[in-house]
Image (cartoon, rainbow, N blue to C red):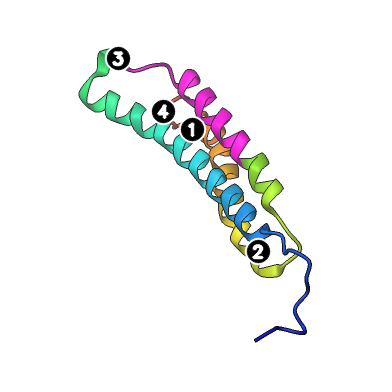
């Protein structure tokens, strides 16, 4: 049966692109946390191979910065999508703040 009220124009797959950018941003946040956790595992089991905190935080911050930029690109005007995109945005922003928090007096780097 023909659909008379359907537009003949092809619809764009924006939801898929948004989902891919959301997933990319979360994967970059996971890679940044992986840098810190790998450092913790090396400290525990192979203390001779532990890199400096500056190197680990620089590498993790690079992943987090890229993830933040992708998360900002993911934002759309839909209130639900703003809420969904806020998860990777806040995850990556917290990773950017992490080295500063650890450098405070009483932290492992300070």
Crowding at dot 3, Cα within 10 Å, few <14 / some 14-19 / many 20+, comes out as: few
Main secondary-structure element of the magenta-colored stretch:
helix
Residue 66 x/y as whole percent: 62, 35
Looking at the picture, tell me which residue is in the foreground, 14 or 36: 14
Mark pair 1, 2: CA separation: 32 Å
Which portion, as a residue range, is magenta?
50-67
Q: Residue at x 70, y 55 (%)?
A: 75
Q: Is residue 10 above or below residue 104?
A: below
Residue picked out by circle 1: 102
Question: Which of pointers 3 and 2 lies earlier in the amino acid sequence?
Answer: 3
According to the picture, the residue beneath numbered tag 2 turns out to be: 81
In three-dimensional space, the C-alpha distance between marks 4 and 1, rounded to whole angstroms, equals 6 Å
Q: Which residue bears the numbered disc 4?
A: 108
Lateral position of residue 46 relative to residue 80, left or right: left
Q: Earlier in the sequence, mark 4 or mark 2?
A: 2
Q: Residues within 10 Å of mark 2 (few under 14, many from 20)?
A: few
**Pair 1/2: label in front:** 2
Q: Quadrant of residue 49?
A: top left
Residue 79 at x, y = what percent? 70, 69
> What is the x, y in percent for residue 98?
52, 37
- Marks 3/1: CA distance? 21 Å
Q: CA distance from mark 4 to mark 2?
A: 37 Å
Disc 3 or disc 2, which is closer to the eye? 2
Report helix, strand or loop for mark 3. helix
Label of residue 34 in the image: none
Which residue is at the front of the view, 104 or 71? 71
Residue picked out by circle 3: 49
Q: Residue at x 72, y 64 (%)?
A: 11
Measure the C-alpha gap from mark 3 to mark 2.
42 Å
What is the spatial separation of the Cα atoms under label 3 and label 4, in whole angstroms? 17 Å
Asked if the residue under mark 1 is in contact with the one under mark 4, i.e. CB atoms within 8 Å, the reply is yes
């Amino acid at each position: 049966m023909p659909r008379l009220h359907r537009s003949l124009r092809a619809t764009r797959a924006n939801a898929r692109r948004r989902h891919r950018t959301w997933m990319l941003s979360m994967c970059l946040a996971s890679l940044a946390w992986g840098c810190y956790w790998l450092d913790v595992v090396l400290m525990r089991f192979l203390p001779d191979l532990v890199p400096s905190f500056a190197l680990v935080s620089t590498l993790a911050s690079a992943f987090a910065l890229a993830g933040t930029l992708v998360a900002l690109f993911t934002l759309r005007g839909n209130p639900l999508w703003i809420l969904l995109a806020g998860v990777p945005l806040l995850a990556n922003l917290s990773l950017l703040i992490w080295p500063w928090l650890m450098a405070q007096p009483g932290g492992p780097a300070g």
